Amino acid sequence: MDYEKSMTMKKMMLSLVLTLLSLTLYAQTESPHLSFKGVPIDGTLSEYVQKMKQKGFDDMGTEDGIAILTGDFAAYKGCTIGVSTLKQKDLVSKIIVFFPDCDTWAPLSRNYFLLKEMLTEKYGEPANVIEEFQGYSEPKDDASRMTKVQIDQCKYITTFKTPKGEIQLSISHKGVMKCFVVLTYKDGINSDIIRAKAMEDL
């Protein structure tokens, strides 16, 4: 009987030690940086691009300190991803996702609200939400709403704040032909480093 109690106690102690060990290892490996696709937003541009390629994105080249990649993201095909650094400091701090273009308001707003719902489920209630049309008149139909997007009078912006950084979802456009949803991940630690580096120039 004593032998069985002894074995039970040993098993319980072993289980406790393994649990504590796994928790310690998790705490040591968890990055203080905001993550994109499970990869902490940190390191040099070339290092980060390599990690994104391993995640299935295609490297389209780099210009002015921004690497451009394409691939699927959050169940959307054909997204464009910009990986941003400051020229004077080769340190990744911001990821920008451009979702596919939409020709009409219905799919554009659907993309925005679906992503907003998923982000809220993951990160909690947003810190700030602006969802309004500007100008002298309120749009009365989807065609006029789309026109507001094209002339930069549509302000749909949702911001999430986390201990590791900021995530912003918005409806944007490029000229009158391209309207799309944008999702920006801004790492807190590296954004502060880059800001301090920029302030040295002032």
Image (cartoon, helix red, strand yellow):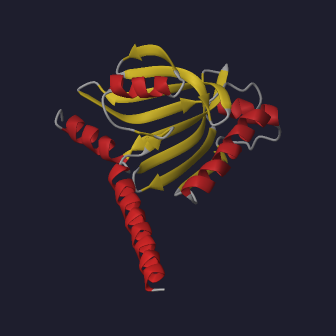
Residue drawn at (45%, 34%) of the image: 95
Residue drawn at (35%, 49%) of the image: 29
- Tell me where residue 39 appears, x and y as whole percent: 44, 38
Judging depth in this view, the residue of 47 and 15 nearest the camera is 15
- Tell me where residue 24 appears, x and y as whole percent: 35, 60
- Using residue 34 as the reference point, say whether residue 174 is left or right of it: right
Instruction: Name above or below for residue 70 compared with residue 11.
Output: above
Location of residue 75 by image quarter: top right
Instruction: Tally the marks.
Output: 0
Instruction: Name above or below for residue 174 compared with residue 34.
Output: above
Location of residue 2 by image quarter: bottom left
Judging depth in this view, the residue of 22 and 159 nearest the camera is 22
Location of residue 172 by image quarter: top right
Instruction: Name above or below for residue 202 compared with residue 30.
Output: above
- Tell me where residue 178 appears, x and y as whole percent: 65, 22
Residue situated furthest bottom in the rendering: 1
Q: In which quadrant is the C terminus drawn? A: top left
- Using residue 42 as the reference point, say whether residue 119 is left or right of it: right
Residue drawn at (43%, 80%) of the image: 3
Residue drawn at (48%, 25%) of the image: 54
- Tell me where residue 86 appears, x and y as whole percent: 30, 29
Judging depth in this view, the residue of 122 and 101 nearest the camera is 122
Residue situated furthest right in the rendering: 141
